[in-house]
Amino acid sequence: MNDLSAAVTRLPIAGGLIPAIGLGTFRLTGASAVESISSALSLGYRHLDTAAMYENEAEVGAGLRASGVPRDEVFITTKVWTTDIAPGDLQASAQASLGRLKLDQVDLLLIHWPNKSIPLATSIEALCDAKRRGYARNIGVANFPSEMLDDAVRLAALHGEKIATNQCEYHPRLSQTKVLEACRKHGVVFVSYCPLGQGRMTDDDAIAPIAARHGKTPSQIVLRWHVQQGVAAIPKAASAGHQRDNLDVFGFTLPEDDMRVISALARHDGRLVKPGFGPEWDR
Ligand SMILES: NC(=O)c1ccc[n+]([C@@H]2O[C@H](COP(=O)([O-])OP(=O)(O)OC[C@H]3O[C@@H](n4cnc5c(N)ncnc54)[C@H](OP(=O)(O)O)[C@@H]3O)[C@@H](O)[C@H]2O)c1
């Protein structure tokens, strides 16, 4: 199979470039996770998304080593769980993640979710400290609504650091206009999680005819819609077939009419990930 890595667009972030398509790894565990990650890297994926909470960092590291792809060619993100973002706890979590990954440094370290009981200023200071200690080349946040992102960017700047990304749910059924605007205003890359709506978008009645017209799969149409907005996406796919589909989205363009039809699928009840401890979302 051809290695598609050269075709993948890379988006500039604070410290380097982030490939616009990465492999989401939530719920990939055990030996099959090592296999999936190694297969993705041989297809050309150069961006892997994991988290302490996924309990698969050891498998992500093992998959990287099994693939034979050099470490410096792969962008690896991990995240600190929301209960661990107080000063001290955050740095300890990052160090433990590096131990499980068997890496000296990740490319991006994220606060996984904000935490109402821990002052944001102290979490951002700890995140900046983790970067200064060399645990991560870049730092960022996830699940931050627009005004909270404004605060995070301002607080990081007090320590001379930049928030590189905000990782949030995004797919055609969920509008993210305000978060996208805030990201663009601050030069923060929006990374889309659940970009396929946890698989629901792959059999959407409105996407199917667009896919047929372009000779592409529905998932390729949805991921192309993301990358044409300058957004990075981290679809999870266990099988090589789905992984290949999802990476092969850089050789065609969706006309504006199709982009508009897809964006018009947004609905008020489109959000899929809404835990009780989550923040007040933008409306
Ligand atoms: N920061 C956060 O709070 C947060 C929250 C949720 C998720 N995430 C990250 O985002 C990643 C992606 O989100 P997600 O896994 O929830 O949802 P998703 O990527 O939107 O959807 C994954 C589902 O789509 C299926 N699929 C993938 N490619 C396909 C294709 N080409 N054709 C048909 N079906 C396809 C997968 O099945 P197969 O596996 O069988 O291919 C899986 O069932 C996660 O793995 C995680 O890394 C982050």
Image (tube, rainbow, N blue to C red):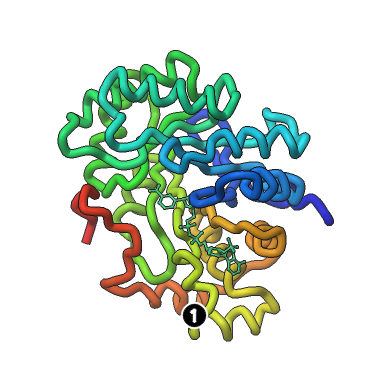
Residue labelled with disc 1: 204
Q: Position of residue 41 (x, y in %)?
A: 71, 45
Q: Position of residue 36 (x, y in %)?
A: 66, 50
**Which image quarter: residue 235?**
bottom right
Mark 1 lies on a secondary structure that is loop
Give 201 or 12, whichever is nearer the viewer.
Answer: 201
Above or below for 77 versus 45? above
Q: Residue at x 72, y 52 (%)?
A: 7
Give 97 or 190, whichever is nearer the viewer.
Answer: 97
Q: Tell me the amino acid under the disc marked 1.
A: Asp
Quadrant in which the C terminus is drawn: bottom left
Q: Residue at x 70, y 78 (%)?
A: 215
Q: Residue at x 58, y 50 (%)?
A: 23
Q: Residues within 10 Å of mark 1 (few under 14, many from 20)?
A: few
Q: Residue furthest front?
A: 30
Q: Position of residue 142 (x, y in %)?
A: 36, 43
